[in-house]
Image (cartoon, coloured by chain):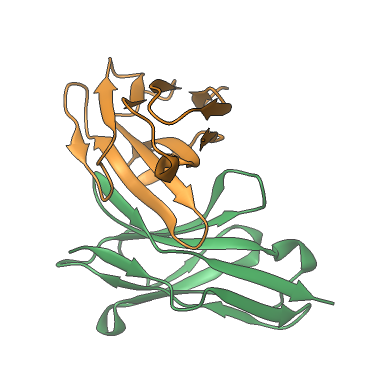
Amino acid sequence: NAGVTQTPKFQVLKTGQSMTLQCAQDMNHNSMYWYRQDPGMGLRLIYYSASEGTTDKGEVPNGYNVSRLNKREFSLRLESAAPSQTSVYFCASSVSGELFFGEGSRLTVL
Amino acid sequence: AQSVTQPDIHITVSEGASLELRCNYSYGATPYLFWYVQSPGQGLQLLLKYFSGDTLVQGIKGFEAEFKRSQSSFNLRKPSVHWSDAAEYFCAAASPPRLVFGAGTILRVKS
């Protein structure tokens, strides 16, 4: 009964380092999403994938790349991390517009 | 641009009092509408959703929301708040597959 699984849950990076956040869902949903959550700003959409093989920019895509590896997996990559990317990242999958969230990944960039 | 606005950053209510959290959306057509709740350090839990039909929607934990097309609003209500309702509440709107959130309203409950 895993739902949406994100890894890692915590990560500390130095400015300029790269990393990939992994996300997998086992609900056979077509759509998957990456959001970041910052105090007072709610959840902002970084990228989404409506279906396997497609990705689209959200509200705040700069500094990020994504890969929809297959129907289950949707990864988020930071090529050169910046302190402004310190945040909590949530992956989600969707059916009929309703989102199902992972537990979040807390990323700190020093 | 599509957007969701929650005008109140913080709201404090007394335990047992009624609650209304405001949400307004700006979309070309009526989107799907949602309310989520997040307790500290936790993920988001869906309270209720509106797709079409009856404009008064019942959700979990005694919450309800009313869709008003003329006001582009989807306000969340609860008749009697419990201390365990203290959390952050997010309104969201979707024109699938894209879903955007409001900035959230932090609810504090005083005894």
Q: Which of B35 and B54 is in front in this view?
A: B35
Q: Quadrant of residue B25?
A: bottom left
Residue at the extreme right: B111
Task: Indicate the position of residue A44 as horizontal and vertical percent values.
Answer: 37, 51
> Which quadrant of the figure has residue A74?
top left
Vertical order, A13 against A110 (above or below): above
Q: Can you give x and y, in whole percent of width and height, for residue A78 in the image?
A: 35, 28
Q: In this view, does B55 lie above or below B94?
A: below
Chain B pictured colour: green
Viewer-closest of A67 and A72: A67
| Residue shown at the point (48%, 52%) measured from the top left | A38
Q: Would residue B106 be visible to someone looking at this image?
A: yes
Q: How many labels does the image show?
A: 0
Q: Residue at point 17% right, 64% down? A: B1
Find residue B92 and report its horizontal and vertical position in percent. Answer: 38, 59
Left/right placement of residue A79 relative to residue A36 reads left
Tell whether B27 sits left or right of A41. left
**Residue sitting nearer the eye, B104 or B99:** B104
Left or right relative to A57: residue B46: right
x and y percent of residue A19 in the render?
41, 21
Looking at the figure, which quarter contains the C terminus of chain B? bottom right
Q: In the rendered view, tell whether residue A40 sits above or below residue B109.
A: above
Question: Does residue A96 appear in the picture of this structure?
Answer: no
Chain A shown in which color? orange
Residue B105: name its quadrant: bottom right
Q: In this view, does B81 lie to the left or right of A8?
A: right
